[in-house]
Image: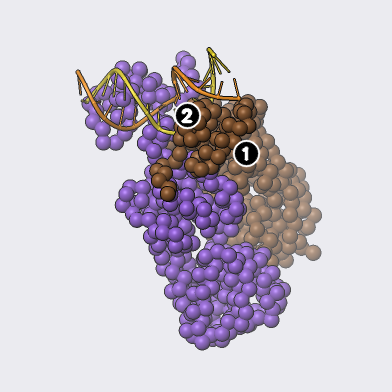
Chain colours: A brown, B purple, C orange, D yellow
Amino acid sequence: MDTSPPRQATSYDVATLAGVSQSTVSRCFRDGASLSPDKRERIEAAAQALGYAPNKIARSLITQRSNIIGVLVGEATVHAYPDLLLKLGAEIQAAGRRMLVFTLSGPDTAAAALPDILAYHVDGLIAGFAPPGQMLDVCAQRRIPIVLYNNISDDGWSCSVGCDDTAALAALVAHLHANGSRRLDVIAGPGSGAVSRSRLQALREAAATYDLPIARTVHAAYSYEAGRIATRALAPLADTLVCANDAIALGAIDACRYDLGLSIPLDIAIAGYDNIPEGAWPPYSLTTLAQPLEMLTRTAVRMIVEQLEGAGASGEHRLMPASLVVRGSTRLG
Amino acid sequence: MDTSPPRQATSYDVATLAGVSQSTVSRCFRDGASLSPDKRERIEAAAQALGYAPNKIARSLITQRSNIIGVLVGEATVHAYPDLLLKLGAEIQAAGRRMLVFTLSGPDTAAAALPDILAYHVDGLIAGFAPPGQMLDVCAQRRIPIVLYNNISDDGWSCSVGCDDTAALAALVAHLHANGSRRLDVIAGPGSGAVSRSRLQALREAAATYDLPIARTVHAAYSYEAGRIATRALAPLADTLVCANDAIALGAIDACRYDLGLSIPLDIAIAGYDNIPEGAWPPYSLTTLAQPLEMLTRTAVRMIVEQLEGAGASGEHRLMPASLVVRGSTRLG
DNA sequence: CTGTTAGCGCCTTCAA
DNA sequence: TTGAAGGCGCTAACAG
C-alpha cells in the first residue's frame, strides 16, 4: 500500500531509492550534464515512482534565476487586448518560463506593489502600461530587464515594443483622403499615456500632409461606453471620425446610428485602431489598423530572454508595422 | 556615491548595517514577533537605505508556503470571460497571494504541464477548465487545494464554484414561454465539458416543465464564428434559439440577420448565457443569463485560502445564482 | 562519471 | 528580547 507522505518527494528521496547521491539526481534533471545511462534509467524510474520533480523554487535560490517573468497589467490593457495575457503566457511558456501576473490599477498602485514584485525575484518584467519612473530606476539598478508593451521611455534601461504609429496612421489618412474625407474629428485616448500621445501626434502629422483639417479633438477612456458618450458630445460631427482604438470606435458607431440617426459610412466615416474581433462583425464592419499582436508579444518575450542570456541589449526599442484593414465603415463608394 | 551591488540586498546586509543579527531582521519582517522599538527603527532605516525586501522565494523554502496560487486557463476560458484573469488576479492579490498563470490548450497539455506546476510548489490551484483526472489525483495526494471554476468533479478532493444552471435556465425558459416561444432549437457547447452538459441538461428539464419541445440540438465551440456557422447549418429554425453562451448567440444573431434574412425577435427569439458586454450593444440587445462573476472569483479564491488556513473543507461545491437579463432579442411585444 | 562539501536567503528552534 | 546554530531543497565547485 501507498504510505508515501503527502509532501512532495525530494532529490534526497530519489537518491536513496535509486542508490545514488543527490548530486547525481540533480544532474539527471539538468541539461548538459553527463551521466551514465544505467544510472539515468534508475533515477528516472525512482523519480517516476515517487512522482518527483525538482523544486524550481529551491533551484532558483542557488541559480539566481527564478524563471519567472512578471507581467504587469491594468484594466485598460486587458480590455484593449483581451487575450494579451493568454498570448504572453503561451509565449513565456514556450520560452521555458512562467508568468507571474500583477494586476494593478495605475502608476500609484504599481509603486506600492514594487517591493512585492522585487520580493518574488522575477527574472524580468513586461509592463502593459506606463510604469512609474521609480520602478524603471529600480529595474535599472538591479539589472532587471523590463519591456514596455506599447509604451516607451527613454530612461536608457527599459526596452519597448510597439507599433509604428506614424506609418500606420499615414496609411489610414491616405485611405480616408482617397475616399473623400475632408475634415476629421478625433477621439484620442486618455490625455496621459505615451500610446495615446504618439497616436495623436502621428495622426496630426498625417492629416497635415494631406491638408486634412482636424476639426476637434477630445480625449476619452479606451472603452465602448466612453466612445459612445464622447461621440454624442461631439455632435454635430465632421465627415470623418478617427478613434484611438476600436472599443471607442464601436461605441462611436452605435452613437452615430442609434443616438444621432446617422448612417455609416454615408453620413460619416469611422475608423479605429487595434483590429479587435468585434470590429469584423457585420453591424460594425470597422476600418481599423491591425497590430501584429503575435509578433509584439513574441518580441517582448524574446527581448527579455535575450537579455537574460546576455545577448540582447537594454534600452532597445522596436517598432512593428501595423496594417490597414479596410472595411465598410469608411468605404463611401 | 552609490556603490551598492546590483544584486538585491539580503537580510544579512541589513543586519550588518543595523548592527543586529539576521534573526532580528527576520523578526522585523514577520508578523507577531516581538522586537524592541529602537531596533525596529534601526532595521527599517537600514532596509530602506538598501532597498531591502525579504526574498519570498527563499522564505517559501522553509515555510513550505509559496503564497502563489496557480491559475490554469485555456483559450476558451479567456474568450468566454475576458477579464477573468484580471479579476482573479485582483482577488488573489487582495488575499495576499500572487497568481502564477499556466496557459494550456486542453486536458492533454494540462497533463504534460503537471510536473511543472508541481515544481513551482503553488499553494493552491484554480482551474478554468476541466482538468484531467490524473491532475486531481495528484492534488488530492499532495493535499493541494484545487477549485474548479464553472466545472465540477466528484473526486472528493476538488472544490468547485459555478452557477445554478437549473434555476437559471428555468427562469429563462419561463420567460421564453411567456413571450410566446413554442419550439426551441439549441446550440449547446462542445460535447465534452461539464458546464456544457450541465447547461444542456438543465435546459431540457426546464423545457419539459413547460411542454416546450426541443426541435434540434447541435454542439459548437464557445465562439462567435462557431455560433454563426452552426446557425446557418441549422436553418430553417424553430421560433426560438437558445445558445450555450453569449459568443455563440451573437454569432447566431448575425447569421439570422445577415445570412438568413430573419428579423429578431420578430421571426426568431435568441438567448445566450454569460452577459458579456457586447450583448448589451444596440445591434444585439441580447437576452442572457448573468453570472455573478465577482462573486464567483471571490468565492474561488476564498475557498482556496480557507483550506490553506485549515478552515475550509475539501470536496465542497458552491453554486451561485445567475440572474436573467431580459433584452430585445426575446421581447416579442 | 560520481560523490562530498558548502552555501543560496530565509526562518525556526534553542539558549542566553 | 536577542543571538547562534541548523536546515528547507537544490546546485556549484571540487576531488576522486
User: Which residue type does callout 1 highlight?
Assistant: Ala
Residue A324 lies, in percent from the top left, at 74, 51
User: Which of the labelled discs sits on residue A95, or is there none?
Assistant: 1
User: Which residue type does callout 2 highlight?
Assistant: Leu
Q: Is residue B158 above or below residue B273?
A: above
Q: Which residue is mark 2?
A: A61
Indicate the secondary structure of the residue bearing disc 1: loop
Which chain letter goes with mark 1? A
Residue B168 lies, in percent from the top left, at 46, 73
Residue A273 lies, in percent from the top left, at 66, 52
Viewer-nearest of labels 1 and 2? 2
Indicate the secondary structure of the residue bearing disc 2: helix
Which quadrant of the structure image shows residue B161? bottom left
Same chain under badges 1 and 2? The reply is yes
Q: Nearer the viewer, residue A167 or B210?
A: B210
Q: Nearer the viewer, residue B18 or B287?
A: B18
Asked if residue B213 shows in the view, the reply is yes
Cα gap from disc 1 to disc 2, whole angstroms: 20 Å
Rendered residue at 58%/31% (across/down): A39
Rendered residue at 78%/57% (across/down): A179
Rendered residue at 70%/74% (across/down): B233
Rendered residue at 45%/46% (across/down): B69
Which chain letter goes with mark 2? A
1 and 2 marks in contact (CB < 8 Å): no
For the C terminus of chain B, give its image quadrant: bottom right
